[in-house]
Image (cartoon, helix red, strand yellow):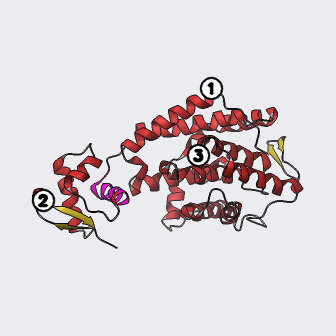
Amino acid sequence: MNPPYQITNRILQLIVSISEKIGEINATHLQKAPATLRKTNRIKTIQSSLEIEGNTLTEEQVTAIINNKRVLAPQKDILEVKNAIALYDAINEFKPNSQTSFLKAHKILMQGLIAAPGKIRSTAVGIVKGSKITHIAPPGQMVKPLLNELFAYLKNNEDLLLIKSCVFHYEIEFIHPFVDGNGRMGRFWQTIILKDHYPVFEFLPIETVVKKRQKDYYKAFNISDKSGSSTFFIEFILSVIEQALEELNLNQLIPIKGKDRMAQFQILIKDASFTRKNYLANFKNISGATASRDLKEAIEAGILGKTGDKNTAVYRFKKS
């Protein structure tokens, strides 16, 4: 049984806008961003996702922990950050359609923070905001069947992946399969679902936008909860993704260094030989002089091998 939602005109408009923005990012090769940008956005993602759940650490403190520096803060908050760092360090190990993988991720995220990390709850839980109960989750005995249905939907449904990722995010909030960590897991697993098909999502700090729009985030969930359909939540999360991509395009199109271009090209070309002309065809926004400099630096660094000279030169990446 599929989760209840409708595909509205608003959803389709957002999908088109998101697809266009992803196209712009792909055209500038930012989908394989420089290491500095990936690191900066990873820090923003970790800090924002944890702050949404009440963690007090700043981006500077998260950076210090990543760099193995001492931080003065509540031990629980520090442990939450360390766990989140470990989780994102293992991001490429998780399989989006695997419930076992999902539970493993929760175990890493919540190790030392709750009694049974990585285990589905069997008790009743509710979401409390202030003194108000805003959501009563399904009874413990329903959690496993609901998760089974959700992963079957994720694997088998033919709707667009962007839509399915939003539905999954909502349903994890609704089912609330764990005693704690559900919000973090919903946001993290949406990234897992999307990143293989759209590489930019591996470092896109969606959580930063969610944090800015936190009241609207909870409002969207509550509206969908009361209506019995995730439609409104899907529209909201797609608008968050659209905003995050827009901010990436506008504010973070930093110059890409030669070594980063070379790393991107190696992923594309693999073991095949190529010429300077081939390299330039892939990076249309650089000059011939810049291409020559990139190739020269890669040869000097021992990354590339070269046969021939000048116009007859042929290059190939060396095996590491």
Which residue is under mark 2?
A: 312
Residue placed most toward the observer, 300 or 125: 300
For the record, the magenta segment spans 256-268
Spatial distance from mark 3 to mark 2, Cα to Cα?
49 Å
The disc labelled 2 sits on which kind of residue? Thr
In the rendered image, the vertical position of residue 128 relative to residue 223, given as above or below = below
Which residue is under mark 1?
A: 9
Q: Percent x, y for residue 310? A: 10, 58
Figure quadrant of residue 135 = top right
| Magenta stretch: includes residue 170 | no
Q: Is mark 2 on a helix, strand or loop?
A: helix
> Which is more N-terminal, label 1 or label 3?
1
Asked whether residue 235 appears in the rendered view, the answer is yes
The residue sitting at the left extreme is 310
As drawn, the label of residue 207 is: 3
In the rendered image, the vertical position of residue 190 relative to residue 304, given as above or below = above
Q: Which quarter of the image is occupied by the N terminus?
A: top right
Q: Percent x, y for residue 171? A: 74, 46
The disc labelled 1 sits on which kind of residue? Asn
Few, some or many residues within 10 Å of mark 1 (<14, 14–19, 20+): few
The disc labelled 3 sits on which kind of residue? Glu
Q: Which residue is drawn at 69% across and 36% down?
A: 233
The residue sitting at the bottom extreme is 320
Spatial distance from mark 1 to mark 2, Cα to Cα?
54 Å
Spatial distance from mark 3 to mark 1, Cα to Cα?
25 Å
| Magenta stretch: includes residue 266 | yes
Q: Which quarter of the image is occupied by the C terminus?
A: bottom left
The residue sitting at the top extreme is 9
Residue placed most toward the observer, 164 or 298: 164
Q: What element carries label 3?
A: helix
Judged left or right of residue 227, residue 35 is left
